[in-house]
Image: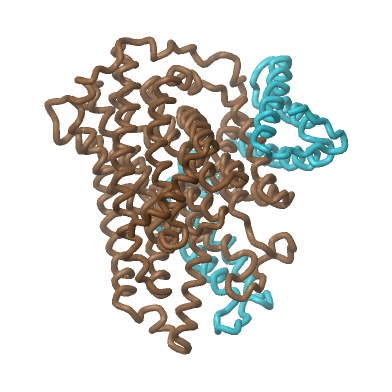
Amino acid sequence: MAMQSFRQRLQTKQGIGIVIALLSGGVLVYLFLTPWALRKLSDGFYLGFFNMLSIGLLLLMGLGLAADKHRKEVPEELKTLTLRGFLGVLGLAAGCLLYFEVMRRIGFLVITPIFLFIAFFALKLGHWWRCVVLAVVVTVIVYLLFSVVGLELPHGFLSVELPI
Amino acid sequence: MFDPAALAAALDLFLHWQTFLWLIIGVFVGTGVGAIPGLTASTGIAVMLPVAFFLPVAPALGLIIGVYKGAIYGGSISAVSFGVPGTPGAAATVYDGYKLTQKGQGRKGLEMALYASITGDTLSDIFTIFVAPMVAVVALAFGPTEKVWLLMLGMVLIGALTGKHLLLGLMSAIIGVFLASIGRDPMAGVTRMTFGQWWLMDGIHLIPLVIGIFAMPVILLEAAKLLGERRAAGTGEQEKRKSVWKTGPGLSFQEFWRTRKELGIGTVIGSFIGMLPGLGSTPAAFLSYALAKHLSPYKKIGTGVLEGVAAPESGNNATCGPTLIPLLAFGIPGSPAAALIGGALMLHGATPGPRMFVYYPDVIYALFMILLVANIVNLGIGRIFARVYATLAQFPKPVLIPLILMLAIIGAYAARANPYDIVIMLFLGILGFGMIVVDMPTAPLVIAFILTPMVEENLRRALIMNPGNPGKALFGSPLAIGLILAMVVLVFFTVQFLKKVEE
């Protein structure tokens, strides 16, 4: 009950403002501890001026949001965002990074159909065979389009090239 | 100011098969992006920006401007066909456009949207061609002090007027300032805020930032919705909708001519609002609709009439050209699309601003030509492929999401072949996702990111010119004081005005 109430309060603009203020405060402390932020350059300007100014303003605005007249409102998208959805997004981002790393090593034409198949399947496109066919077709179309434009895609160690 | 030699050079740039090819591709892609609900013009431009990077300047401008104009028009296709705006700027078109479809006059509605878009766009482009050089002449007189405050005016206006909440918009701009200050200091070249990472020494590149902030969050949000659902998404539960193009007769010239008052209202409002940084096509469309309804109550706008489509569609498309006025005259992008067009120019070595009229007049003239010809291409493609685009609006999200993710990854990598750009793009994508979820607009971040190095350069130049006297450096000219006052007054009155329009 207390946990749910805490989560509900965190979802309000007040909660968001407090989180932003705390994060900004942390970065500001980090900046003050660095040797370069207060270093004076030859023209008299401080190297970390814009960094500190922006983080300082963000801190103040975070506190302002927490005290604002709209502080009790909960943003629409945040109301409907589920934990499952949020974890799915993080998983998707991690999957994209993995896809890229593997693509550099084994090539676009090999890994992309696999990536697309997994993505289509995870996003519930439909039957597995539909996902396979679409993954292959989309890969070939994108490869041909980028070849026409002149953008070279990673070939990896397989060096598979279509004659364009 | 008019330079015949530059015009000849511009014709040389413009009259090239590549320019026309990429303009046509841009409009084609842009209209499709606009027709799909959930995707915006910024998303389309962000995904195509890496391609523009590899093209010569005129084809690159053709591609980006084609995507922009196509997307602004394309939003009306699903607005009229299904009652769902393809882009935020088409939301006002739904009121009458979808009612026309329900009355069996969908084809008329689609054609009205097309012709209204082209009319508003063309007239406002002509306005831009005359006004931008005149404003640039004034801007050339600005020194570093005036430029600092002018750029600050642009950033504050965009932060304050974009989105529903003043503080959130300003916070977005400040995050952009912070991100821009990562890397090398623009004057001394000393690195800062790199967290000890060597790959941040050159700062954040524009392309992964733009893709991460404009393309990724929209797609991640759609993915979050799909992944959060337990049922299957692509198993045909979307009802097959009859092609709107087959419903009823087409638009006659008399019917089009009857809406000339509403077209005029949309064009004037769209041109004016397009010039102001931070507002964009959505308020232009709603304001045009509201004013047309108010001025012609006997036409019963809101009950499914052509005038109710003419006003918002001419209004939203009339912002396309004038949004480039602050960019070309002052170097201040007035909208996300203008920021991306400015980015495309910067990637080709032409920094937008008044000096562009002096050093790159051929590029300016070529840009003007592209603006005008893009409308003709938009008309042709819209007329021929409208029924295809209406079908595209039902494109399954489970296919769209991975496709755009893949294009985003390739695009971000292609710019510099730097694998860390993917890390940056994904990080910014999650940041942008977080921003959208908490109702923080993302456009001010990108615009502030582009403007911050210019602010810093001019500020430090002003300080060097007035050693030991920061007061004089910042407030030493009447124009600078005027710009500061203008900033305060404009923000205050525009916020009040927008509140009234919302009510």
Looking at the picture, tell me which residue is in the foreground, B276 or A131.
B276
Left or right, A65 with respect to B177, comes to left
Q: Which chain is cyan?
A: A
What is the basis of the colouring in this image? by chain
Left or right, B155 with respect to A44, comes to left
Looking at the picture, tell me which residue is in the foreground, B240 or B207.
B207
- Position of residue A41 measured from the top left corner of the image (x, y, whole percent): 60, 82
Number of numbered markers: 0
Q: Quadrant of the C terminus of chain B?
A: top left
Left or right, A138 with respect to B269, comes to right
- Position of residue B397 measured from the top left corner of the image (x, y, whole percent): 57, 26
**Residue B39 appears anywhere in the view:** no
The residue positioned 35% from the left and 27% from the top of the image is B114
Q: Residue furthest toward the right?
A: A157
User: Which of the 4 image quarters holds residue B78?
Assistant: top left
Rendered hue of chain B is brown
- Position of residue B74 measured from the top left corner of the image (x, y, whole percent): 42, 29
